[in-house]
Structures are given as C-alpha cells and as structure tokens.
Amino acid sequence: MKNDAIAIFGGTFDPVHYGHLRAAAEVAEQLKVSDFRLLPAGHPPHREGTWADAYHRLAMLELALAPYPDLAVDDREVRRSGPSFMVDTLASVRADAGDAPVLLCVGQDAANGLNRWHRWRELFDLAHLVIMTRPRSRPRYPQDLGEMFAERRVQRTRDLMTTPAGRVRQVEVTQLAISSTDIRRQLASGRDPRFLLPATVLAYIRKHGLYAQAAGA
C-alpha cells in the first residue's frame, strides 16, 4: 500500500544520469509514497550556475522519466522567476499538499551543509527531511544542525506519515560512480558517455549541442 504523501528529490540534473535515477527508484521504493517527484532547480542560488539552461534540464529529465510512471517531474522552480530557494519551493508544495506529509530527499553532502540554506530552520515546518546515504558518505554536521537532526530523527518510514513535517530519517541508496561533472567533461572532450545516462537524454544533448564547452566543469 502506498503512503499518501509527496516526496521531492531536487537537483540541478545537469545532466540527469543513472545515478540520479537509481537513487530516486530506491528511495521511492523504501518510502512507498503515492507521489514521488524529481524537481530540477530553476536558478540555484548556492551555485555559480548551471551549464544547461533550465528548460533543457527539464526536458532531459522528462525524457529520462518517461518510461517510469511511478516517478514524476515537478517543474515549479523552472516556471518560477528569481532565485530557487528550497524554502519557497516547499511552501508552494505544502500549499498543494494540505496536511499530507511532504518529504524532502537530499544527499548526505547537501544535508551536511543544510545550515547554509536560505531560512533553513523553516524547512522543518514545511517538510520531513530524508537523507540519502551511500556507503562512503559520512555525516559532518555543525553542532547546531547535528543537534536538530538528533532531536528529530526517526527510524521508520511510518513515523514520517503520522505528521505533515518536522522529522528526519536516513535511507541507504546504492553508490554508483557516475557524476554529471564527469559526463560533461567526456562530452566536451569528444568521448562517448553512453550507458551512464539514458539514450534519449544523450540524443537530446547531441541534438542541442549541450556541454560542448564544459571541459573545465
């Protein structure tokens, strides 16, 4: 039985690859939510920028997820103007969700630096936090963040489903040695990154000439 909840897995997806897709599939399976969404960042304020424009990254993600009806694309950050702060995105999702649980899924590296996110304490008023851990990833939380996580941590998915927001759960996902940075470098140097990302995404990249200048990415 699926849990009546919304899960959000955000990222730049620049480009989306099988590491992203495998992590999404595993977390969706463990959480058993009725609505699991991958959300491409529109204008990420914590990065220098993205290589591909938001509409290209959205299109690639839609192509990648087309065969998988249990995974959806949420385009609200691409449609929204201005910086893409997660607190604003979650407020928008919360408005749609009502009192249903909302789960924000992030990797361990992102969780380690959550205290640097815009209005980060408000995130827990809007959603639960699901930290996706890999065998080689290590928690390195500053004291205030670590204490907050410890106070809110639960061990079972069902503990996330009894309240709309505010709890923290860790889930393990498979480590795949694939990165968007490496794919961009391969493309820029004329190498073939097939089997690292869906063929439909690679065809889109070649059709639009994306990442040709990304050698230093």
Image: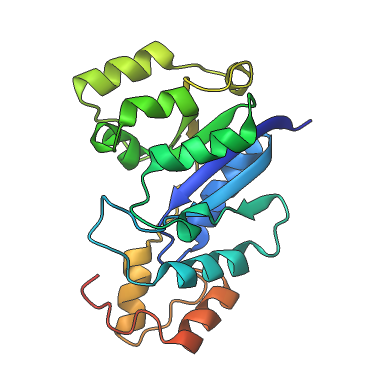
* Residue drawn 50% across the image and 88% down it: 207
Note whether residue 93 is visible.
Answer: yes
Asked whether, in this view, residue 35 is left or right of residue 12, the answer is right
In this rendered view, identify the residue nearer to me: 136 or 212: 212
Visual colour scheme? rainbow
In this rendered view, identify the residue nearer to me: 176 or 202: 202
* Residue drawn 64% across the image and 53% down it: 72
Above/below status of 31 relative to 153 = below
Residue 21: where, in percent of width, then height?
Answer: 55, 55
Query: Quarter-wise, where is residue 193 in the image?
Result: bottom left
In this rendered view, identify the residue nearer to me: 195 or 102: 102
Residue 128: where, in percent of width, then height?
Answer: 49, 26
Asked whether, in this view, residue 35 is left or right of residue 195, the answer is right
* Residue drawn 20% across the image and 25% down it: 142
Asked whether, in this view, residue 112 is left or right of residue 94, the answer is left
Q: How many marks?
A: 0
Above/below status of 159 relative to 35 = above
Query: Quarter-wise, where is residue 68 in the image?
Result: bottom right
In this rendered view, identify the residue nearer to me: 86 or 181: 86
Note whether residue 169 is visible.
Answer: no
Residue 28: where, in percent of width, then height?
Answer: 62, 41
Asked whether, in this view, residue 106 is left or right of residue 94, the answer is left
Residue farthest right in this picture? 1
